Amino acid sequence: MYEYLFTKKLPPLTMEAREVIRTVDAKPHLLARVTVKGTYFPQRALVPFMRIATGRSKTVSAWFTEITDDENGLVGYFPVDVPARGTIEFGYGSEVMDRFELPFDAKKMTRLNRKLVEKGAVEVTTKFLAAK
């Protein structure tokens, strides 16, 4: 595993943010998907997390986070009312493993046309997640 880290050159770090529809509990949900690629994200027994840090102690956490099968990508699913700006943090359990130098900017997120989103889709917001 560590041999990969020292012998393979990883691509440059990239981040993409876009709204997506994802089925959760058999219902369509409108979420903000943030994908970071270009470094190594090992699969571990602990659950990974991703969050957007907006200040000294203010963060917005992804509802759930996945590591891609090739372990070169991290995907976090956030409420659609993500903060305007911040820094992406990543870790396992409760331990932050890394902060990415790519700043998060909600203005650059690709938004879906709400008129085309299927009826009955649950719009995931921070208020929605707080009530769960």
Image: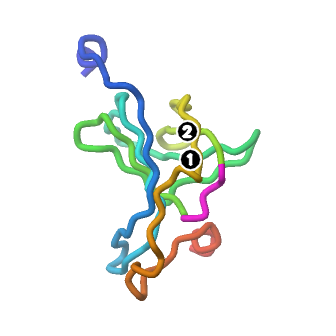
Q: Which residues are magenta?
A: 80-84
Q: Quadrant of the C terminus?
A: bottom right
Residue depicted at 55% across the width and 36% down the height: 95
View extreme (bottom): residue: 119
Q: Is residue 22 left or right of residue 105?
A: left
Front residue of 24 and 105: 105
Contact between marks 1 and 2 (CB within 8 A): the answer is: yes
Q: Helix, strand or loop at disc 1?
A: strand
Kind of residue sitting beneath label 1: Arg
- Marks 1/2: CA–CA distance: 5 Å
Residue count near mark 2 (Cα–Cα under 10 Å), binned few <14, some 14–19, many ≥20? some
Residue depicted at 48% across the width and 77% down the height: 114
Q: Quadrant of the N terminus?
A: top left
Q: Is residue 104 left or right of residue 92?
A: right
View extreme (right): residue: 56
Q: Position of residue 118 (x, y in %)?
A: 38, 83
Task: Tell me which corner region of the image, top left, top right, bottom left or bottom right, holds residue 13.
Answer: top left
Which residue was labeled with disc 1? 51
Report the number of numbered marks.
2
Q: Is residue 118 left or right of residue 102?
A: left
Give the vertical position of 60 relative to 94 (above or below).
below
Front residue of 91 and 83: 83
Q: Helix, strand or loop at disc 2?
A: strand
Kind of residue sitting beneath label 2: Glu
View extreme (top): residue: 7
Which residue was labeled with disc 2? 89
Residue count near mark 1 (Cα–Cα under 10 Å), binned few <14, some 14–19, many ≥20? many
